[in-house]
Structure formats: structure tokens, C-alpha cells
Image (cartoon, grey):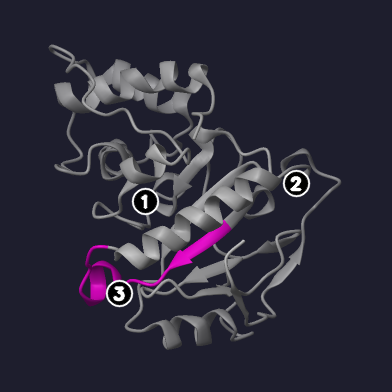
Amino acid sequence: MPRVIECPSPNFDARPQDQPEGQAVDILLLHYTGMESATAALARMCDESAKVSAHYCIDEDGALTRLVPEDKRAWHAGVASWAGASDINARAIGIELVNPGHEFGYRAFPEAQMAALIELARDILARHPIPAHRVLGHSDVAPLRKQDPGELFDWARLAENGIGLWPGDAPAVERPEEAEVKRALAAFGYGYLDQDFAAVLGAFQRHFRPAAVTGEVDGETAGRLEALPSLVDAGPRET
């Protein structure tokens, strides 16, 4: 476990152990702070009136702050859905990455920050039964509202370190059909497909084909989506 700065937030409650959704932590959810500074982000997550928090926050220099114990439910996902579950906070550990986000000058995530995230994530995965296909971004579970951690986040590097999935240069699908893409997105876990298909497809692209986030069906996107089930079946990568 990397060195941790303690900054307790009042914004948490108990995980609901009497509900199936809360019986085990099985999602690792990554965010960006979307604020102008780390100081502002930490202040907001420690403001009782804001009613938001995360378990951890990683600054751009790699400094790691713990706000909520892992056995408690932090308030970071908001209105969200994954694989039919709606109380994502009950089953997730949330990590905020300091980054101004799309509103304040979105930029790449520095080396020190990525290295600290990898160290922390691997430590979390050693303690919790989180499958690789449930290492997700906020935009995956809340595609109608959120874009973070965004298209500049290096999901491929995480997968190389045994954290999450990355389909790589999967073969493109010729003449992909929207109905089949929609079915595959639902099977993987995405919700809200009947509300805004383009937004959901854009969230998938932001995670798995970030070079072109169009919200439109194309062969490369369909190919990467088609490749994911085989990666899930292969199980965790040895590192």
C-alpha cells in the first residue's frame, strides 16, 4: 500500500449488508475530480453539505489521500447503473484522480499519478474479489451524465498491469448492425441504452476506443466490443 494521507470525509454510510447489492465489493470505479485544483476537490469531498466523497483521491504528483474507509459506502457514483444494479456505491470502491476535467481544461494524467493509481489499484484488487471487467469509469455507469475519467485516461496501461480489460487492436467488424451492438453493450453491463444509445456508445468508446468518441456505430468499435467477452472468459492476467 502506498503512503496515505488521511483526510476523513463525513460523507459516507454503511454498506447495506442486508441487500444482495451490498454483500461484496465487486466494482472499482475511477473518476476525475473535474475541479480547478486538488485543494478544491478535497474540500468539496469533505464538505458535509456537498454529500459527495470517494474512498481515495490521487493528486497529479502521486500523493494519495484516503477519505473514506473501504468497508464504508462512499458517495461517488450518483445516479448510475451497471449490469442491472443501481446502487453502485454499495458495491464499489471509488478513486478520484485530480484533473480539471472537460470543463476546466482536461489534460493527460501524469506519470506519477498513473504509477500511484496502479500501486493502489493492485493493492485493492488483492483484498477484494473485483473482476477485471468490473474495473470501470464513471462514464461507464453514468453515461447520460458523466465523461470521466475520459478519453485521455490510459486504460491500456492499467490492463497491462493486471487492472481491468483492454481489447487492443481487435479486428473490425464489417457492416456492424446497431441492434447487435446494442445487445452486446447490454450483455457487457451498460445501462440506459433505450434512453440514449449514442451517449452509451460514446461512453464505451471513451473507455475502449478513445481515439474517436463519436457515439456512432462503426466497425472498429464493434470489433473491440466483440472481443471483450473472450477477455472476460480468459480471467485475470498474470503480472
Q: Position of residue 118 (x, y in %)?
A: 46, 53
Q: Secondary structure beneath disc 3?
A: loop
- In the image: residue 83, left or right of residue 62: right
Furthest-top residue in this view? 174
Q: Position of residue 232 (x, y in %)?
A: 48, 22
**What residue does disc 1 label?**
144
In which image quadrant can residue 214 be found?
top left
Q: Label 2 near label 3: C-beta < 8 Å?
A: no
Q: CA distance from mark 3 to mark 2?
A: 31 Å
Classed neighbour count for the residue bearing mark 3: other residues with Cα under 10 Å, few (<14), some (14–19), many (≥20): some
> Identity of the amino acid at label 1?
Leu
Residue at 66% of width from left, 75% of height from top?
Answer: 11
Of labels 3 and 2, earlier in sequence is 2
Query: In this rendering, is residue 176 above or below 129?
Result: above
Classed neighbour count for the residue bearing mark 1: other residues with Cα under 10 Å, few (<14), some (14–19), many (≥20): many
Q: In which quadrant is the N terminus drawn?
A: bottom right
Q: CA distance from mark 2 to mark 1?
A: 24 Å
Q: Label 1 near label 2: C-beta < 8 Å?
A: no
Instruction: Report if residue 196 is visible in the image.
Output: no
> Identity of the amino acid at label 3?
Pro
**What residue does disc 2 label?**
22
Q: Secondary structure beneath disc 2?
A: helix
Q: Position of residue 156 (x, y in %)?
A: 32, 41
> Identity of the amino acid at label 2?
Gly
Foreground mark, 2 or 1?
Answer: 2
Q: Which mark is residue 100?
A: 3
State which region is magenta.
94-108
Of labels 2 and 1, earlier in sequence is 2
